[in-house]
Amino acid sequence: MALKTVARWSFALLLLLPASRLVGQSPLQWPVPPPGPPRRLVFPEILIAPAEAAKLLKGGATALDARGSEAYAAGHLPGAATAGETPPGTIVVYGGEDGAGREEVARQYRRLRREGISEVRVLDGGIAAWRASGRPVETGPPNSRPNPASTGARTALEVEVETKQVAEAFGQEGFELLDVRDARGWNRWRTPPTFAAGHIPYSLPFDPRALLPARGWPRPAEVRRRLAAFGPRPGDPVNLESTFVLYAGDEADPRLDLGYLLLTLAGLDARVFPGGWKEWTAGGARPVVRVISAAELAGRLRRGDPGLSADRPARDLVLVDLREPRDFAIGHLPGALSLPFVHFAADFEKTVESGWPGADRATLPLVLYCYGIDCVRSRKAGAQAAHAGFRDLLWFRGGVQEWREAGLPLLDSPPAPPPTPASPAATSPGRGDARP
C-alpha cells in the first residue's frame, strides 16, 4: 500500500511540473524523449513538370507563352495565351530556357500575381521540356480572345511595397532590403561599385542571376540553402523568416522579377519595391548610404586638419567610432568621437550634440566606422542614424584596418577615467537627472 501511495504522489508531482520543465532535464531527472526528426519544409507548388502541366491544362487551366510573337507562331502549347493577357483560373507560364527566356517567365509571373492571380504555375524546362516529353504543340498566330476585364474583378496580391513602407521599415527586424542593381552581388572583400556609390540604408547587394543553373530553374531547397548563408558577413546571415524586398534602378530591371520568383519558389516572403533607386532618390530628401574609402575620407578630413593630427571633432563632417572605448583610446581616426555601438541608440543624440552642436542633418555628412570589413556595426548604426534624420551617410567599411594599411595616422588618447560614485545629493529625490 505504501509503495502505491508513493507512486501516486510521484505521478501527481509530474503532472504539476510546468511543460517547459519537462522538455529539458528536470530537477527530478525525469527521462527526456529523444528529439524528433527535423521538420520537413514544404515549398509552394510553383514549378511543375510537363505531365502535371498537361493534367492542369486538361482540367481547364490556361497556358501562357512568355516569348515573343515569332516564337509563339513557330510552336506553342495548345490554346496558349500570349504575354500580356490575363486569362481566368489557373495559369501555366512557360518560355525559353536561356537567360532572357527565364526572365520573361519571371516577369509574367509577377505581373499575374500583381493582378490577383494566385494560382500561377511555371513549366519547368519550358517548351523544350514539353516537346521532349512528346506532347503536341500548335503553330500559327494567337486567336482573338475576350477582353480580360470581362473575367471579373480581382484582388491584387501582396506583391509590391511603396516608398513610405520602405522608409519606415529599413533596418527593422524582420525586414530585409535586397539591391539587385550590381551584377556581382555581395563580395566579402570588395563592395560592388553601383552599391558603393549609393544605396538605401541597410540594403544588401544581391544578384538573383547567380542562383540560376545553366538551364532550367534551381530547386527550391537549393535557393533556400544559399539564402540561408547570405548576409553582410560570414556567419551573420539574414533571417529567412523576414520579408524580403527587392529593388533596382527602376521597375524595368528584369532582375526584380527574377528575384521575386526565385525567393517565392523557396517559400520566402518576397516583395518588390517597383520605384526603386530612382524613386527613392527623387527630390533628395531621403537618406542614402555611400561606401567611402580611406583615401576619400582622409581628403575630407584634411580640409580642416591638413596634418591629420588634431584630436578634436572634425569640422565638415560627423565622424563616429563604433568600437570599444579601449580600442578608441589606443588609436582612432583624427576628428572622431567614441560611441560604442552597444550605446548607440541611447547616446547618439548626446554624442552628436557634444561634437557638432546644431548640426544640419539634411546636409552634414555622417561617417561611421568600426574595426574593418568584417564589422557590421556601421551598417546597423547607419540605419538608426538615417531614422534620426541624417541623409548623407558615409560607411567607411574598411574601418581602422583599411586606414592603417593606407599608412594614415591614428591618434591615441588616455582612457576615460572611471565614473565618480554618485553623491547622496545626486541620488536624492528631485535630482534623478544629475550626472556624477
Image (cartoon, rainbow, N blue to C red):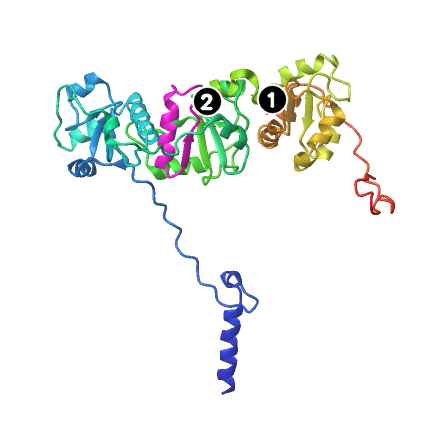
Q: Is 250 displayed left or right of 379 in the figure?
A: left
Mark 1 sits on what residue?
Answer: 391
- The local crowd at label 2, few if under 14, some if 14 to 19, many if 20 or more residues have their Cα within 10 Å, is many
Q: Residue at x 34, y 34 (%)?
A: 155
Q: Which residue type carries mark 1?
A: Arg
Residue 267 on the magenta span: yes
Residue 333 in view of the camera: yes
Mark 2 sits on what residue?
Answer: 276
- The local crowd at label 1, few if under 14, some if 14 to 19, many if 20 or more residues have their Cα within 10 Å, is many
Whether 427 is drawn above or below 163: the answer is below
The residue segment tinted magenta is: 250-276
Quarter holding residue 369: top right
Quarter holding residue 324: top right
Q: Residue at x 80, y 31 (%)?
A: 414
Where in the figure is residue 257, as x and y percent of width and height? 36, 26
- Callout 2: SS: helix
Residue 392 on the magenta span: no
Q: If the image is split into quadrants, where does the C terminus sit?
A: top right
